[in-house]
Amino acid sequence: MTENEGYTWLDGQLVKNEQAMVPFMTSALHYGLGVFEGIRCYATPRGPAIFRLKDHIQRLLESAKILGFRSLPFTQEQLEEACREVVRANGFESCYIRPLIFFDSQVKNLNLDVGWARVGISAWYWGAYLGDEALEKGARMNISSFTRLHPNIMMTKAKITGNYANSVLAKTESARLGFDEAIMLDPQGYVAECTGENLFIVRRGVIYTPGTWAVLEGITRDAIITLARDLGYEVQEAQISRDHLYVAEECFVSGTAAEIVPVTEIDHRVIGSGRRGPVTYRLMQAFHAVVRGEDERYQHWLDLVNP
Ligand code: PMP
């Protein structure tokens, strides 16, 4: 199936992808006034299942509240069902789901109270976001020359479309320099996150990750912290400096699109052994068993598309 043959859920109805259009004058297009989610659906023995659907839709609604939407046309339950409906309509076993709430009004206006919210949900097949090779050999990253957003300037807990201009600057620079992904520092100079992933390091056997004061509260990050602790690892939130990264035994990043990806080079310095580390590999295996529905203990994280 090509992308044009699929279906998008738009404002409560399924329409063909090629008919899921918005007018040029939609203000969301001009000012980045939308909030979105990225969710993965996995093939499991009980059919396609959406990973942590409730948590993703809750974060979507929180993002909408943070941006300032006062009312939305759909409830949490309706949006969860709409995600399942999109997967069913497209006949996917596994896919990536993209809900977007966007502000519609004439472009002459920047006030969210003068206009209304619209909602679309699309889905597509998406393989390894940072590439298959990075899953085994590890990704090569650089520290971005662009600083991550200060929490008083943009709202880092929200997936606001406009926030991603900052990610695009860093990602494009990183790709042009020949790296796979950029690591961004917060305004104090400590490690924040990547352009679309949270970051972890392992040092003297302990797993560290930046606290959520200036980064997105990643749902994969939360799953990894839970899985790591259940496996007996110590996990701590910490302020991580740039040089902490260089001397880490292991480094990996997490996100819905990327899943878990080892990082084996930062700023031309080899991290640890230069190969995917044992802690990273163990967490990758645990995570993939969970999302494929092979671990009974975490079935509550899977939302069946055809219950
Ligand atoms: N940070 C940023 C900036 C992101 O865009 C994402 C992707 N949503 C993440 C972290 C990881 O979050 P999650 O695990 O919920 O996808």
Image (spheres, helix red, strand yellow):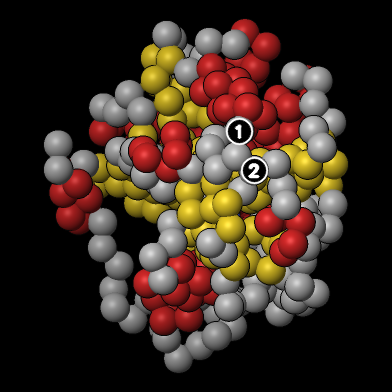
Q: Is residue 244 left or right of residue 132?
A: right
Q: Is residue 79 left or right of residue 215?
A: left
Q: Residue 86 at x, y = what percent?
A: 35, 36
Q: 202 or 70: nearer the eye?
A: 202
Counting the numbered discs, the total is 2
The residue sitting at 59% across, 83% down in the picture is 111
State whether residue 238 is above or below residue 44.
Answer: below
> Can residue 159 be seen?
no
Residue receiving disc 2: 272
At mark 1, the secondary structure is loop
State whether residue 88 is above or below residue 69.
Answer: above
Q: Residue 203 at x, y = what percent?
A: 78, 41
Q: Residue 254 at x, y = what percent?
A: 58, 43
Q: 115 or 23: nearer the eye?
A: 23
Q: Amino acid at mark 1?
A: Gly
Q: Are marks 2 and 1 in contact (CB under 8 Å)?
A: yes
Residue receiving disc 1: 277
Q: Residue 241 at x, y = what percent?
A: 78, 62
State whether residue 281 is above or below residue 161.
Answer: above
Query: How crowded is the residue under tag 1: few (<14 C-alpha within 10 Å), some, or many (20+)?
Result: many
Q: Amino acid at mark 2?
A: Gly
At mark 2, the secondary structure is loop
Q: In terms of image quadrants, where is residue 252?
A: top right
